Amino acid sequence: MKSIYTVLQLIFLILFSFFNTGCKKSKVEISPTTETLVESVYGSAALYPKNGYYINATVSGILMKKNVFEGDTFLKNQVLFEIENTSSDLQSTSAKSNLQLAEENLEGKRNVLFELEQRLKASQSKLTLDSINFLRQKSLWEKNIGSKNDYDMRKLTYEMSASDFIALTSKYQQTKSLLKSQLTNAKSNFLLSNCLVS
């Protein structure tokens, strides 16, 4: 019993010393000092001459010939440097191929729209036939001729044909718009690549 009492006293003593030291207020002292202030401003800038002109090539390439030198005067539209640019030739060839492909896709013999037009015509014919069959079956059903199952099948077939026709019409319009846009972009790229080459 005494050992438990001794252990409790020891725990009480430890807790008391812990709380006693934790609750003491520590003083932080601040003392003012006198010093000189330093003010600094940092910045970066690029300096250019007032009447300077910087020439940039519209294309990248290897400088083949210098027609003017530092300090020379030159005329407006005078060729200053000649650059060999094989990449612009490749860009022009690529732009021409893209233009031909875009024209072929929209207007050529094997254009993408031809297949869609054929599917759209077939879908319209099927819709017309399914509509006629549905109206016939509906007329018979109203006269109590035929089965409900036949009527429902004709109606479902007609509704599916109408849905297919609407979806194909939308796809045709979207494809046509996309192909026209691709052709316009290909023409612009072709003209731009020819301007860079010349």
Image: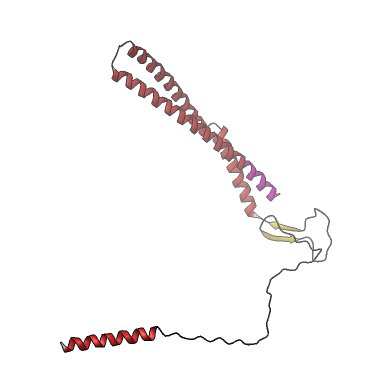
| 80 versus 193 height, above or below | below
Q: In x, y percent, where is residue 92?
A: 63, 47
Residue 82 lies in quadrant: bottom right
Decide which of 161, 97 is in the foreground and name it: 161
* Residue 132 visible, this angle: yes
Indicate the position of residue 45 as horizontal and vertical percent values.
Answer: 71, 69
Residue 78 versus residue 182 in the image, above or below: below
Task: Give the prevailing secondary structure in the magenta stretch.
Answer: helix
In the rendered view, would you say 42 is above or below 176?
below
Q: Is residue 100 left or right of residue 22?
A: right
Foreground: 168 or 42? 42
Q: Position of residue 27 (x, y in %)?
A: 49, 86
What residue is at 35 percent from the left and 15 percent from the top? 137
**Residue 196 magenta-highlighted:** yes
By what rule are the colours in the image chosen?
A: secondary structure
The segment highlighted magenta reads 186-198
